[in-house]
Image (tube, helix red, strand yellow):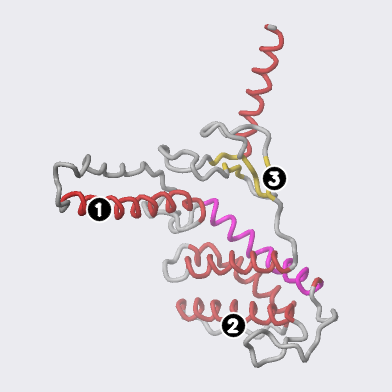
């Protein structure tokens, strides 16, 4: 386990609270300056209270992304092939497109097939990363893999083989991992295949609000209340097993109450 903080979304709540604390300190400092230099010091009021530094629980990287975020990147990378197929199916260029219509402030006409443009752009993006990685290892440049979907399939398969090493290297990990997540989100949005967010029945054990939810296909449940756990390091996050255990305890407690009544 590395001491380095995970750069992924698992620490998004902690980063937000750290940034809010920095802004609160800046506001407090401005108030202190005004208070110290007040002309009428007898009626200037009480001294501004310095904001309390929040207690943050950061998830560590292994070594750069945490295990959960690394798994999310691997899953997103493996899914790029299917998401692109759905993107091409949803926008194959045969819709009602006016080739004379221009994008606002753009001198160029619309592309007859934005989906195929996305496919070409993604393949180029992957090829550039592959060649940079190969160069860092002293390997020859990437072989020709054809065009469009077959090239994407081969490229994704190659990256899945080398992903563990790529995500462990500081010069590649953040850029490639973030890029994979970006592309997956972009294709899912374009193909309208974004996973649903499902609300859970139990209340959050930390803020006691009905704000627990799970993104379809993911193995964790999160509280969507931004103020949840303000003094505990951020909103509640639990595994499915932990949630199911709490659900079982809630059901059993309800049974006991019914028997007692």
Is 216 placed above or below 201 here?
Answer: below
Give the foreground label among 1 and 2. Answer: 1
Q: Earlier in the sequence, mark 3 or mark 1?
A: 1
Q: Secondary structure at mark 3?
A: strand
- Residue 209, horizontal then vertical, whole percent: 58, 34
Which segment did they paint magenta?
67-89
Q: Which mark is residue 142?
A: 2
State the residue at coordinates (47%, 70%).
172
Give the foreground label among 3 and 1. Answer: 1
Q: Earlier in the sequence, mark 3 or mark 2?
A: 2
Q: Which mark is residue 108?
A: none
Q: How many marks?
A: 3
State the residue at coordinates (72%, 67%).
83
* Direction from residue 126 to residue 58 in the image, left or right: left
Residue picked out by circle 1: 29
Is 126 placed above or below 12 here?
Answer: below
Q: Nearer the viewer, residue 187 or 77?
A: 187
* Direction from residue 62 to residue 222 in the image, left or right: right
Q: Label 1 neighbourhood size at 10 Å, few (<14), some (14-19), many (20+)?
A: some
Q: Is residue 74 magenta?
A: yes
* Direction from residue 23 to residue 227 in the image, left or right: right
Dominant SS type (magenta): helix
- Residue 36, horizontal then vertical, whole percent: 16, 50
Residues at marks 3 and 1, CA–CA distance in whole angstroms? 42 Å
Q: Nearer the viewer, residue 23 or 211?
A: 23
Q: Secondary structure at mark 1?
A: helix
Q: Is residue 144 magenta?
A: no
Q: Label 2 neighbourhood size at 10 Å, few (<14), some (14-19), many (20+)?
A: some
State the residue at coordinates (69%, 76%).
152
Residue picked out by circle 3: 198
């Amino acid at each position: 386990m590395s001491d380095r903080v995970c750069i992924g979304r698992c620490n998004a709540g902690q980063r937000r609270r750290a940034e809010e604390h920095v802004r609160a300190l800046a506001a407090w400092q401005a108030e202190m300056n005004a208070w110290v230099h007040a002309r009428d010091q007898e009626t200037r009021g009480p001294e501004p209270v310095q904001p309390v530094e929040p207690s943050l629980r950061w998830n560590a990287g292994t070594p750069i992304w945490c295990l959960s975020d690394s798994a999310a990147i691997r899953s997103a990378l493996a899914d790029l092939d299917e998401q692109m197929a759905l993107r091409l199916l949803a926008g194959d260029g045969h819709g009602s497109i006016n080739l004379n219509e221009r994008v606002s402030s753009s001198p160029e006409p619309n592309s007859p097939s934005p989906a195929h443009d996305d496919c070409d752009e993604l393949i180029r993006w992957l090829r550039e990363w592959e060649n940079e990685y190969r160069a860092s290892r002293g390997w020859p440049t990437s072989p020709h893999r054809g065009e469009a979907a077959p090239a994407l399939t081969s490229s994704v398969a190659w990256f899945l083989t080398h992903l563990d090493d790529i995500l462990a290297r500081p010069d590649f990990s953040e850029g490639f991992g973030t890029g994979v997540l970006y592309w997956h989100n972009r294709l899912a949005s374009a193909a309208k295949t974004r996973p649903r967010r499902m609300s859970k029945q139990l209340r959050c054990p930390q803020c006691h609000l009905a704000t627990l939810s799970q993104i379809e296909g993911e193995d964790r449940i999160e509280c969507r209340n931004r103020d949840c756990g303000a003094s505990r390091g951020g909103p509640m996050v639990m595994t499915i097993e932990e949630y199911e255990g709490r659900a079982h305890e809630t059901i059993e407690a309800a049974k006991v109450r019914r028997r007692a009544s």
